[in-house]
Image (spheres, rainbow, N blue to C red):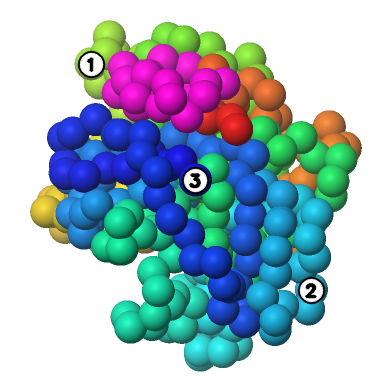
Amino acid sequence: MRAAVLNAPHERLRIERIDTPDALEPHEVRVATAAVGICHSDLHVIDGRVARPMPVVLGHEASGVVTEVGAAVRDVAVGDHVVACFVVFCGECRMCRAGRPAMCQNREATMRKADATPRLSRVGREVHQWTNIAGFAEEMVLHRNAVTVIDARMPLDLAAMLGCAVATGVGSARKVAAVAPGDHVVVIGAGGVGLNVCQGAAAAGAASVIALDRSDERLALASERFGASHVINTASVVDAASVIRDITDGGADHAFEAVGVPALIDLALDATARGGSVWAVGVFGDDARIAFSAGQLHSGKGVHGVRAGSLQPQTDLPLLVGDFLAGRLELEALAGRRIGLDEINDGVADLVAGVGARTLVVF
Ligand SMILES: [Zn+2]
Ligand SMILES: [Zn+2]
C-alpha cells in the first residue's frame, strides 16, 4: 500500500510503497483509510520541534472502514465505520480502570512487541507508526482500542477530524475546564483545535467567547460558524489582554492556549480574572519552557495541562457523532480543502501558511 513517509526532519513527505503484515495479531484491526486530517502536531515532527524516530508515517486523526479483525476482537466487525484516535489505551492500568484512558500508563501494551513483524515496514525495515495510528497511508493496522465504531450515516471525511481537533477542542471546554453558563472564555489560536474550544464553550453557555489569532480568515470563521462573540487580531492589537479585561469586566474565567507558544501562556494569565484558569491545550516543542510572574498564582490563577481533552474515545466520539447528526456540532466549516495523498505536501504547506482550517487527505 502507499503511504506518505517522513524520512528525516525538514524533508518533504515522500509517497512510498509500505508493507503491512499479512497476519493480524489477536487484538488488531485492519482499516482502509477514508480520510485523515493534517494537524499541527504532525507539523511539529516535520519541522523537528518534536523529535521522533525516523522514518515515520505521520497522521493521527483518521477515519476508515474495517476490512479485517483479529481473532480476539469481538466488538468490531468487517465493514464497520471507525474513527482512529491517538488516545490508544490498554484498558487495564490504574488510569484506564478509573475511566481516564487519555492518561493510560501502559500504551506499550497496545503496540507490537519489538521482535514481532512491525505494523509498517519498507523492504523488511521498520517504518515507525506515529501515535500508533499512521493515518497518512491507504491502510492502517491498529490496536482495537485505537478505533471507535461510529454511526454509518456520519460522513467519513468529516469524521476524521473528530479524533483530534474536535475531541481535544470540545473536550477541553466541556470536560476539562467544565465551562459553565455565564463564564467568560478566551481562546488563543483559532486553528482546528481552537475553533472547537470556541464551539464547546459557546454550547456550554459561555457569556463571551473571545477568539485571538493572527489570521482574519480564521477569526471570521470563529465568529460566523463557531460561536465566538468577539475576535481580536493579535497582529494588529498591541495589548490584547487589556481589551479582554474590558470586554469581560475584569478578566476571563478561562483562557485556553491552543497554539503551543510559551509566551502565549503569559498572555492568557494576563487576560484572566483573579481565580481564573489557564488551560494549555496546544502542543509545545520538546525544549519549550514557560515563564510567568509568580504573582499570578497569588491572584488565585492556575495553569493546567490538558491531554487530548481528557477524551474517552469509546463514549465521547459516538456522542460527538450524535451531536453532528442532530445539527449541534459544526464540522463542515472546519474542513478546508480535500486533497489526494499525492498532494499531501501542499496540505502541509497550507498548514504552515495558515490557509483554511483543516486540510483533509481523502482516499
Ligand atoms: Zn492533532
Ligand atoms: Zn491503560
Query: Where does the image place residue 320, in percent across and percent down from the top left?
Result: 73, 48
Q: Answer whether labels 2 and 3 touch (C-beta < 8 Å).
A: no
Query: Where does the image place residue 294, in percent across and percent down from the top left?
Result: 16, 58
- Amino acid at pointer 3: Met
Query: Where does the image place residue 280, in percent across and percent down from the top left?
Result: 36, 51
- Alpha carbon separation for disc pair 2 and 3: 26 Å
- Alpha carbon separation for disc pair 1 and 2: 54 Å
Label 3 environment density (alpha carbons within 10 Å; few <14, some 14–19, many ≥20): few
- Amino acid at pointer 1: Val
Closest to the camera, between mark 3 and mark 1, is 3
Quarter of the view holding residue 76 = bottom right
- Alpha carbon separation for disc pair 3 and 1: 50 Å
Q: Name the element at disc 1.
A: loop
Asked if residue 100 can be seen in this view, the reply is no
- Amino acid at pointer 2: Asp
Q: Is residue 345 magenta?
A: yes
What's the residue at 48%, 17% (across, down)? 356
What's the residue at 57%, 72% (across, down)? 23
Vertical order, 327 against 300 (above or below): above
Magenta range is: 338-359
Q: Which mark, residue 1?
A: 3
Q: Is residue 165 magenta?
A: no
User: Mark 2 — residue?
Assistant: 75
Closest to the camera, between mark 1 and mark 2, is 2
Q: Which mark, residue 238?
A: 1
Query: Where does the image place residue 249, in percent across and percent down from the top left?
Result: 47, 31
